[in-house]
Amino acid sequence: MPDIESLLSEKRVFEASREFRKNAHWGRKQVAALRKEGEKNPVRFWEKMAREHVDWFSKWKKGLDWKPPQAKWFVGAKTNVSYNCLDRHLTGSNAHRRNKAAIIWEGEPGDTRVITYAELHREVCKFANVLKGLGVKKGDRVALYMPMVPELAIAMLACTRIGAPHSIVFGGFSAEALRDRVEDAGAEVVVTADGGYRRGEPFALKPAVDDAVSGKSPVRHVVVVKRTGEGATMRKGRDLWWHELMEGASAKCPPAKLDAEHPLFILYTSGTTGKPKGILHTTGGYLTHVTTTAKAIFDLKEEDTYWCTADIGWITGHSYVVYGILANGATSLMYEGVPTHPGPDRWWDIIERWGVTIFYTAPTAIRTFIRLGDEHPKAHDLSSLRLLGSVGEPINPEAWMWYHRVIGGKRCPIVDTWWQTETGGIMITPLPGAVNTKPGSATLPFPGVHAAILSEEGDTVKPPDGGFLAVTHPWPGMLRGIWGDKKRFRETYWSKWKNSTHRGKDRGGVYFPGDGAHKDKGGYFWIMGRVDDVMNISGHRIGTMEVESALVSHKDVAEAAVVGRPDEITGTAIVAFVTPKGGKQAGTALTKALRDHVAKEIGPIAKPKDIRFTEALPKTRSGKIMRRLLRDIAAGKETVGDTTTLEDYSVVARLRGDEE
Ligand code: PRX
C-alpha cells in the first residue's frame, strides 16, 4: 500500500481549546462512557441515541434484526422524517424555533432567501399535497433533478412526509444519466427547474429532462420550478409549473406514520461495473444515525449557522445539508453557485456576511483555494468560525494545516469525517470536544461503529500495517440494499470475507467499503483511498467502467481503458487509453469529440483530463486489461511488480514512448 510511510511520519497532534472542550455537547468523559457502551452493546447504544434524538409515533419491539446481509433497525417502530425535521420544532419547548432560519439560501447572482422553520413547514405541506394531487402514493418513487435551490429541500421533505422515496440525480449529470436512473427507479414524477446559475450565466436544465423522458418512459408528470425565467418548453398535460401548483395547494398535510424500515430514498453511486447502483436507505435508522452524528460531530448548537458546501445531489448534501441538520433544529446555509464567482473570495465573503460558525467542505476545494492564494480568505473576517469539517477523500496533511491556519485561524478544531453513500452517515471521525486530531487522519470510529483493518483473508492486521477497511457490526444508517439487485448487494459489500476470522460470529456479516486503510499505534485510522476500480474525482465517485462504456459507445472507438492518476487539485484525474477504430484519425479533434461524448453520456465531471491514443492496450494472456500497468504509465511511474502475464510487452514500451 502506498503512502503508509509518509503518513506515519505525521507527528503533529492538535487539541481543541479548553473552552471548546468545556462547552462541547460531547466532552471527554461522556465520550469515553459512550464508547464503552457502543463497544459492548452497539444495539443498546443506538437505541439510546434513537430515544434521545428522534421523535417516534410508536416504539420498536426490537433494536436490530440481523440476518446478514439484511438488517432491520428499530423493528416495528413508526416515525416520519419531515416531522422530525419540521413539526417538532414548532411546538412545546422548541416553539422558539418557529421563526428561526431553517434555510439561509444564497443564489449565485447574489439574491437571497431566508426560510424559517414555520415557513418551511408550510411549503413542505403544500408540496406534499401537490404530489398527492399528481397521484403520488406511499412507496412511489419521485426523481428530483434540480439546481441548489430551496425547492429541492422542500421537495425532499415533502416526499418523506407522504412516504414517497426520492431519488435525487445531481443537476450536473447528463440526460442519459438521468434517463437511466429514472427508469431504474421507475419514477413517475420528476421535479426539476427551468435552470440555475453557474459561473455568472444561467444554464438550462429542463431540456435534459425532455430528452430523458422522451420515448418510452415511466414518467407521467414533470414539475418545473421557475428559477432563471429563461423559459422552458412545457408539454401540455405532462409538464406543470411548481408555482402554479403551489398556489392552490393546502398547507395542511399530516405526516404519514411510516415504518422504521420504510424506504426513504434511493441515491445512485458508481461501482466497478458500468451500471450505477441505486443505494437504498430507510427511515428510522438513517434518521437516528444522521441526527446523532450531526449533533455530536458538528457540535450543533441553537445559535450556530452551519454551512456544508456539498450539492444536495450527493449523499453529503442529503445527510448534512438537509436531514441531519434540520432534524437538530439548526440553521443550514445553502449556496447555489461556483466557489469562485464573481471572484475567488465568494465563499469567504459568504462566511463573513452570514456569520457562519461551522463550515464543512471537501479537500479538493481546499486545495483549489490554496492555489488561488491566501490573500482572498485573509481579506475577510472569518472570526465567526468555530469548527471546520472535511469529507470526500483523504485530506493531505499540508491541506489540513492550511485549512487549520488560514481558514480556522488556528482556533477551530477540524473534523475529518470518513463515510460513504452506502453508510448513510459519518462513521470514522474526531469528536471535536473529546478527540485530539492529527492532520490527515479521520481518527476513530464514532461510538457504536465497529471498524477494523483486515487482510485479504479477513484476519486483523496489526498496526501500523495497511489493509482493507471493514465494518464488523451493522449500524443504523447502513444501506439496506441496491435497488432491484439483491445479488449485487451481497456480492459487492458482504462477500469479501465470508470466512473472516475477525469474529467467528460475523460470517458473511462483515461490510467491505472498498477503501484501504491502516491504523497507527495510537489506534487512529488513516484512510488511504479506493482499492477497487472506482476513482475519487474531487470527492465524487466515478467508476472506471462507466467512463469506459461511455467511450466505447462512441462510433470511432474500438477499445478503451480508464485509470486514475494522482492530481494536485482534484485528488485523482481521469486518464483514458483509447484505441480508435481502423482508419480513424487520432488527434485533437477526436480528443475533443470523446470528451464531449463522455460529458453527454455521464456528465462533465466524468470527462477524461487526458486521452492517449494507442494501437493496443496491455493485456494478460487471458485478455484482461492490465490496469495496474496503465496506472503506472498514467502517473509517469516506473512499472513495478510482475509483468510476466503480459501478452505483448512492446505495447507497454510503445505507450511509455508515447509519453516522451
Ligand atoms: O474512498 C472514500 C472517500 O469517498 C468514498 C465515498 O464516496 P461517496 O459515496 O461519494 O461519499 C462521499 C461523501 C461521504 C469513500 O469510500 N472518502 C470519503 N470521506 C473520506 C474519504 N476518504 C478519506 N477520508 C475521508 N474523510
Image (cartoon, rainbow, N blue to C red):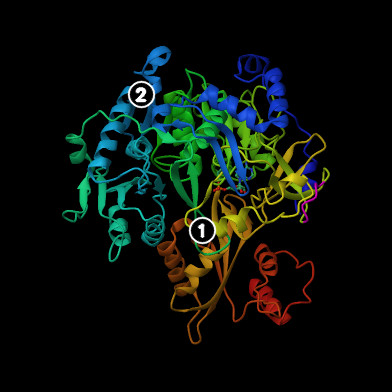
Q: Kindly identify the amino acid type of the residue bearing the numbered disc 2.
A: Tyr
Kindly indicate whether the residue at mark 1 contacts the one at mark 2 (C-beta within 8 angstroms): no
What residue would you read off at disc 2?
117
What residue would you read off at disc 1?
485
Residue 449 appears in the rendering: yes
Report whether the residue tagged 1 is closer than 8 Å to ligand 1.
no
Task: Please state the extent of the stretch shown in magenta in the rendering.
Answer: 457-461
Which of pointers 2 and 1 lies earlier in the amino acid sequence?
2
Query: Is residue 491 inside the magenta stretch?
Result: no
Residue 142 image position (x, y, % from top left): 35, 48
Dot 1 falls on a residue whose secondary structure is loop
Is 334 left or right of 638, judged from the image as shown?
left
Q: Nearer the viewer, residue 72 or 460?
A: 72
Residue 539 image position (x, y, % from top left): 56, 48
Q: Note whether 313 is above or below 150 in the view shown.
A: below
Q: Kindly identify the amino acid type of the residue bearing the numbered disc 1.
A: Asp
State the separation of the CA atoms marked 2 and 1: 38 Å
